[in-house]
Image: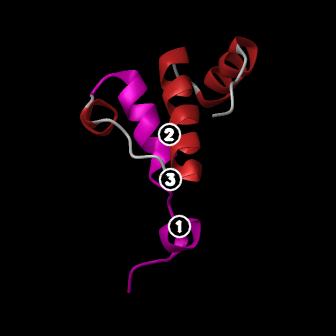
Amino acid sequence: MELISDEKLRMLAEEQGWSIARARGYVDGENFRRLGTVPSTYALVGIDDYGLGFRAGYFERDAAASNRKSA
């Protein structure tokens, strides 16, 4: 898995208005998704900042679908 520096995590957290734990979870989630790795139950149901960030990074969203207006 790609390691990210503490400085890059801090920058991501500041840019998004997140805690460092949420930024770390987001990066980990993206990496798990890209590698096709099955996440732990904790990462999928945890309600702390890390878990929220992990799920945001792990579950890919279709930007086009979210921009469509409902009929």
Whole-Å distance between the Cαs marked 3 and 2? 10 Å
* Above or below: residue 66 compared with residue 48: below
Disc 3 is placed on an element classified as loop
Q: Quadrant of residue 1?
A: top right
Residue at image mark 1: 62
Whole-Å distance between the Cαs marked 3 and 1? 18 Å
Closer to us: 51 or 15: 51
Give the main secondary structure of the magenta stretch.
helix
Q: Residue at x 42, y 24 (%)?
A: 50
Disc 2 is placed on an element classified as helix
Amino acid type of disc 2?
A: Gly
Crowdedness near tag 2: few (<14), some (14–19) or many (≥20) residues, C-alpha within 10 Å? many
Numbered mark located on residue 37 in the image: none
Q: Which residues are magenta?
A: 47-71
Of labels 1 and 2, earlier in sequence is: 2
Q: Is residue 1 left or right of residue 36?
A: right
For the residues labelled 3 and 1, say whether their Cβ atoms are less than 8 Å apart. Answer: no
Q: Position of residue 22 (x, y in %)?
A: 48, 25
* Above or below: residue 49 compared with residue 34: above
Residue at image mark 2: 29
Residue at image mark 3: 36
Q: Residue at x 55, y 24 (%)?
A: 24
Q: Position of residue 28 (x, y in %)?
A: 53, 33
For the residues labelled 3 and 2, say whether their Cβ atoms are less than 8 Å apart. Answer: no
Closer to us: 69 or 13: 13
